[in-house]
Amino acid sequence: MKNNSLGLLLLIATVALTGHACTPDPDPGSDEGKPVGAAPPAADAPQHAAPDVVPGSHADWCGAHQVPESLCTRCNPSLVAAFKATGDWCAEHGLPESQCLACDPELKIERPPQDGGDL
C-alpha cells in the first residue's frame, strides 16, 4: 500500500506537537510486538529516541521496534488513528501496513544515515 505523503506529514506534525512516551516491551526477551524478521538491536544500542529528536533523522529511531520513533505506533498508540485515517493500517497484525513485515517480508525499513550534524 502506498504511503500518503500528506498523511505522513500529519503524523510527523502530530508527534512533534504532542511528544511521545515509549513503554518497554512486556517481556524484553520475547519477540512480541517486534516486526517479523527484524534484526535484534545491539545490546548497547539505545532502545528509544530522545523526545526532542528531529523526525526523519538518524536519531529518530526506535531500537526496540526497528522503525522511526516518530512513527512507532507501539510506543505511541496515539498515532494509530492517523495511520488508519490514511489507509495505512494492517488490522491483522495491528501495525501500519508500511511497517508490517509479516504481510510484506521483503519490506525494508532502514534507519536514515547518520550525517555530520546528527549525533
Image (cartoon, rainbow, N blue to C red):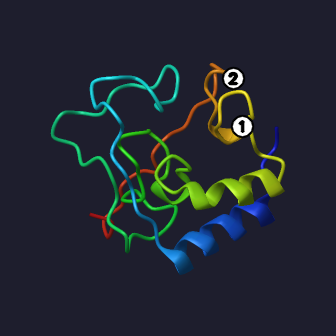
Residue pictured at 23% horizontal, 33% vertical? 42
**Which label belongs to residue 67?**
none
Label 2 residue SS? loop
- Asked if residue 62 is positioned above or below residue 56 in the image, the reply reads above
**Outermost residue toward the front in this view:** 26
Q: Is residue 69 left or right of residue 64?
A: right
- Asked if residue 52 is positioned above or below residue 91 in the image, the reply reads below
Task: Give the x, y percent position of residue 63.
Answer: 35, 43
Please identify the quadrant where the N terminus is shown.
top right
Residue pictured at 37% horizontal, 51% vertical? 23
- Asked if residue 77 is positioned above or below residue 36 in the image, the reply reads below
**Outermost residue toward the bottom in this view:** 17
Marks counted in the figure total 2
Quarter location, residue 85? bottom right
Q: Nearer the viewer, mark 1 or mark 2?
A: 1
> Of marks 1 and 2, which one's residue comes earlier in the chain?
1
Identity, as a three-letter code, of the amino acid under mark 2 = Asp
Please identify the quadrant where the C terminus is shown.
bottom left
**Which label belongs to residue 97?**
1
Residue pictured at 58% horizontal, 31% vertical? 108
Q: Nearer the viewer, residue 70 or 30?
A: 30
Alpha-carbon distance for marks 1 and 2? 9 Å
Label 1 residue SS? helix
Where does label 2 land, which residue? 104
Q: Is residue 63 left or right of residue 71?
A: left
**CB atoms at circles 1 and 2 under 8 Å apart?**
yes
Q: Nearer the viewer, residue 8 or 89?
A: 89
Identity, as a three-letter code, of the amino acid under mark 1 = Glu
